[in-house]
Image (cartoon, rainbow, N blue to C red):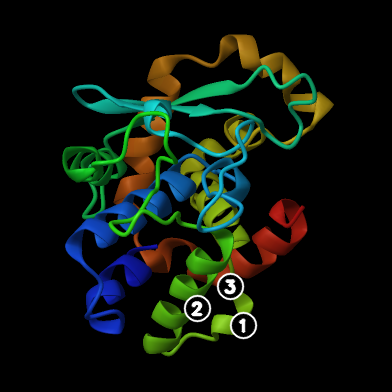
């Protein structure tokens, strides 16, 4: 995540700061929220899915955290929605800081797509994929091994490495009957501790096991 965010200015030098703030928030929210790309992005640059696409009112900043509404998750068959809270990480790319920077400049109305760019078009899966691959290619990584699904998996693996593996199916809303009982016991402090630990992890802490853990457990 940090490599992608750090690379954006050099890889896309003509990108307006407004749009850069949008992508920064999209990416950090996706990783820290363990989100599917469809839970944030619009289906096309000019249209929204009224049931799924995140809108301006779905992100609400607080003092040291923010709330994000997931309107229609993959396993939310009744479309009741979820609300997650993302806490400050203390890291160089704190998700709360990027969310606040985006909310401070966002000009679109609350009912419009949350990630509407300066020209009025929306961030889509294809646009995020292009950005991820271009940024990773610039760092020397094999961009073919990464795509939009890497945000969700890239959040899950560090959470496990930070010592919160039992919370991964809950935080990521993976369908797993063995973890459903933990839902009622998950406290706000559990989530806060997890985000702070996640923010302190370095790439070397998880690099050796990332691909195997991702393939075995999270590529679904």
Label located before the other in sequence (3 or 2)? 2
Do the residues bearing badges 1 and 3 touch, measured as CB atoms within 8 Å?
A: yes
Looking at the image, residue 8 sits to the left or right of residue 69; the answer is left
SS type, badge 3? loop
The residue located at (24%, 45%) in the rendering is 102
Give the x, y percent position of residue 63: 18, 22
Residue ID for mark 2: 133
Frontmost residue, 53 versus 161? 53
Frontmost residue, 101 versus 110? 110
Give the x, y percent position of residue 156: 56, 48
Looking at the image, residue 59 sits to the left or right of residue 38; the answer is left
Give the x, y percent position of residue 68: 43, 29
The residue located at (30%, 49%) in the rendering is 200
Picture quarter containing residue 61? top left
Q: Residues within 10 Å of mark 2 (few under 14, many from 20)?
A: some
Rounded to the nearest angstrom, the CA distance separating label 1 from label 3 is 6 Å
Looking at the image, residue 83 sits to the left or right of residue 78; the answer is left
Do the residues bearing badges 2 and 1 touch, measured as CB atoms within 8 Å?
A: yes
The residue located at (38%, 33%) in the rendering is 56
Do the residues bearing badges 3 and 2 touch, measured as CB atoms within 8 Å?
A: yes
The image shows a total of numbered marks equal to 3
Picture quarter containing residue 134? bottom left
Q: Is residue 200 above or below residue 125?
A: above
SS type, badge 2? helix
User: What quarter of the picture does the N terminus occupy?
Assistant: bottom left
Give the x, y percent position of residue 118: 28, 57
Residue 144 image label:
1
Rounded to the nearest angstrom, the CA distance separating label 2 from label 1 is 7 Å
């Amino acid at each position: 995540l940090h490599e992608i965010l750090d690379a954006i200015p050099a890889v896309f030098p003509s990108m307006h700061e407004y749009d850069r703030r949008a992508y920064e928030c999209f990416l950090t929210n996706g990783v820290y929220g363990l989100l599917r790309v469809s839970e944030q992005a619009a289906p096309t640059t000019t249209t929204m899915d009224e049931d799924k696409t995140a809108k301006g009112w779905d992100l609400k900043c607080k003092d040291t955290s923010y709330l994000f509404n997931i309107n229609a998750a993959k396993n939310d068959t009744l479309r009741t929605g979820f609300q997650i809270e993302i806490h400050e990480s203390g890291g160089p790319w704190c998700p709360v800081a990027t969310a606040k920077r985006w909310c401070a400049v966002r000009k679109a109305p609350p009912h419009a797509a949350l990630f509407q760019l300066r020209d009025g078009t929306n961030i889509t899966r294809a646009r995020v994929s292009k950005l991820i691959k271009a940024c990773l290619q610039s760092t020397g990584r094999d961009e073919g091994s990464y795509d939009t699904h890497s945000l969700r998996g890239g959040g899950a693996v560090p959470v496990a490495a930070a010592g919160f593996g039992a919370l991964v199916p809950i935080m990521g809303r993976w369908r797993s009957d063995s973890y459903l009982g933990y839902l009622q016991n998950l406290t706000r402090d559990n989530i806060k501790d997890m985000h702070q630990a996640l923010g302190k992890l370095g790439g070397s802490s998880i690099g050796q096991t990332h691909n195997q853990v991702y393939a075995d457990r999270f590529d679904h």
